[in-house]
Amino acid sequence: MAGEFARIARYFAPLAGPAGLGLRDDAALFTPPVGAELVLTVDQMLESVHFLPGDDPSLIARKLLRRNLSDLAAMGAAPLGYLLTTALPVQTPESWLAGFAAGLAQDQAEYGLTLMGGDSSSSKSGIALSITALGAVPRGRALTRSGARAGDELWVTGTIGDAVLGLQARLGAWADEDGVLTRRSLLPEPRLGLALHGLAHACIDVSDGLVQDLGHIAEASGLAATLYAAAVPASPAAARQGAAALAERLTGGDDYELLLAVPPGHEAALRAACGSVPITRIGQFTPGRGVRVLAADGTELPLPRTGWTHF
C-alpha cells in the first residue's frame, strides 16, 4: 500500500473542499454560516463489529458517512462537511482504498458536503474508521431528545427492522429473495431536509434499536412512553418474516429512521413536512417513567433486550 502522504494525495485530497486547504495543513479553516449554530457529531465503524470482512468498501464508506448524516437530520441540521480518520492494516490493497474513496465521492455529491481533513494511521488488526460531521441549523431551531411533552404522539419515518433482518439474512438466518433487507443493512437513507421545526418537540434517529432509542427520548424528557408494536411499520420484505421477527425489528437498530414527539392535531402538517417520506404514528408520551411495549391485545410484550449495547 502507498505511504501515508501519497495515499492522502491520491485518494482523499480530491474529496476536499475549500475548508480542507487541499489536505496540506494539519487543520481546516472554516467560516460558519451567518445566523446558524454548528452541529457536530462523530461515529466510528470497526471491522467485524459494524461491517463484515469482505464487504464492499464503497458501501462501507457510504454507510459511515450516512450514519453521521442521520445524526444531523435528527437535530434538523443541514450537512456542511466532515473529518475522516482511517486505521488500516498494512496489507490493505489499493483497490480497497479506491473503492472507499469512490463511495465517499458518490455521497458527497448526493448530499452536498466535502472532506475538511482528518488523520490516517495503520492498524495491527482490522479496519477502524470514523467520521466527524459538521452541520448547521438556524439559531434556536435545533431538535433535541429532551423536548417531548406529555400528550405528544410518537411518530416514526420509513420502516423499522429491515437493517437487522438484512444483517441476519447475510449470516443465513433469513431468506432475502429480493435483496431489500440486505440493501437496507448495507446502505441506510438519512432523513435529511425534513421541515420539522415547529412541528416536532423532540427527535432521535433509530440507530441502537427502536425501543432503546425511544427510551432515550423518554428519559431525557422526564416522561413515560407507550409503543404499540403492531403499529410499527414493516416493509413487505420484513413483513414476510412474520411474528418471529418482531422482537428483532423492535430492538435491532441500524434503521436510521427518525423517531419524533409531535403534539396531537398536527398530522396533516407533519405529513406535508415529510413529503414523500412515509411516516407512521406508533405510540404516545405520558407522565411517568419508562417505556411500555404493548402487543395487539394490549398486554405488555416481553423483549429479551431493548437494543444494541456497545459494551
Image (spheres, helix red, strand yellow):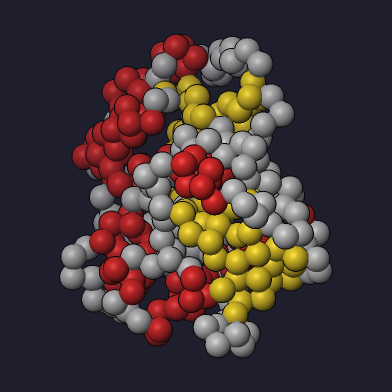
| Residue found at x 38% / y 31% | 111
Residue at image x 47%, y 17%? Answer: 20
Question: Can you say whether 123 is above or below 219 in the image?
Answer: above
> Could you tell me residue 58's position as x and y percent?
28, 42
Is residue 291 rendered to the left or right of residue 191? right
* Image side of residue 50 versus residue 225, left or right: left
- Foreground of the two, 234 or 33: 234
Q: Determine the residue positioned at 56% across, 73% down.
A: 228
- Of the 4 image quadrants, the one containing the C terminus is bottom right
| Quarter placement of the N terminus | top left
Taking the image as shown, residue 189 lies to the left or right of residue 283, namely left
Residue 301 pos. (x, y %): 58, 84
Residue 88 position in % (x across, y down)? 39, 44
In this figure, what is the number of numbered marks? 0
* Closest to the observer, 38 or 281: 281
Q: Which picture quadrant has residue 17?
A: top left
| Residue 163 visible in the displayed image | yes
Q: Where is 45 relative to 252, above or below? A: above
* Place of residue 171 in the rendered image (x, y in percent of width and height, measured from the top left): 30, 73
- Residue occupying image coordinates x 55% and y 29%: 135
Is residue 134 visible in the rendered image? The answer is no
Where on the picture, by quarter, is residue 102? top left
Q: Nearer the viewer, residue 28 or 133?
A: 133
